[in-house]
Amino acid sequence: MKTIIEGFMKFQREAFPGRSKLFQQLAHSQSPGALFVTCSDSRVVPELLTQREPGDLFVIRNAGNIVPSYSAEPGGVSASVEYAVAVLGVTDIVICGHSDCGAMSAISTCTCLDHLPAVASWLRHAESAKVINAARRHATPQAHLAALARDNVVAQLANIKTHPSVALALEQGRLDLHGWIYDIGSGGIDALDGATMRFIPLSDFPLTRATQSKPDPALA
């Protein structure tokens, strides 16, 4: 805790003064351009890997970068998605998985989670990824885990489309979806190409999207 407090003091002393005008603006409003859904893993820092400033990203973090399908009893993730899309008007949603994910590892190795009932219940929202992944053959356990992380991103993109605010924004052509896998060791990101359903290097194909906005019929 000592280092955390020291970090805060350094922020106040060194980082805050240079961004004082930005923080004055953010003190009364926010206008993030994107909703970024990623894992709670301490090694994944959205603002660092995208080099964004405070106010640029609306972030949801949880075990396994999961977005439950919309239901009659929506929870905190659903509320955050709805607020980001319907109120803040984000134009992009990124669902970002990552390498060496503990949640995906538990699923891929069928780890017994009886002692972690809340975790076990939460990971059921990745069931479709688990089933699809299990139907394929994998050369190694590492390949199995990497494939499951990708399958889970695809599954969560499907889940988020069931949210009314997201469905409406997609229909109206004011929202794009992105599926990313961040490799912790290399710092690289592979992005889902919605046309081919393959993950390709984002650095080589920066315009890659999982779901593009619906084109304006008048421009077709």
Image (spheres, rainbow, N blue to C red):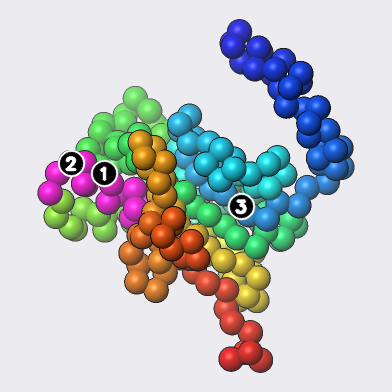
Tell me the number on the disc at residue 141: 2
Disc nearer the start of the sequence (1/3): 3
Local SS, label 1 = helix
Tell me residue 6's x, y (percent).
65, 12
Q: Main secondary structure of the magenta part?
A: helix
**Amino acid residing under circle 1:** Leu
Find the magenta span and give its range: 139-158
| Residue that numbered label 1 is attached to | 145
Left or right: 32 with respect to 104?
right
Crowd rating for badge 3 (residues with CA inside 10 Å; few <14, some 14–19, many 20+): many
Between marks 2 and 3, how big is the CA–CA gap? Answer: 32 Å
| Residue that numbered label 3 is attached to | 35
Asked whether 46 or 204 is in front, the reply is: 204
Query: Which residue lies at the image location 72% right of the left edge and 60% below the top edge?
Result: 89
- Residue that sits furthest to the top in the current view: 2
Crowd rating for badge 1 (residues with CA inside 10 Å; few <14, some 14–19, many 20+): many
Crowd rating for badge 2 (residues with CA inside 10 Å; few <14, some 14–19, many 20+): few
Tell me residue 63's x, y (percent).
45, 37
Asked whether 122 or 62 is in front, the reply is: 62
Between marks 1 and 3, how big is the CA–CA gap? Answer: 26 Å
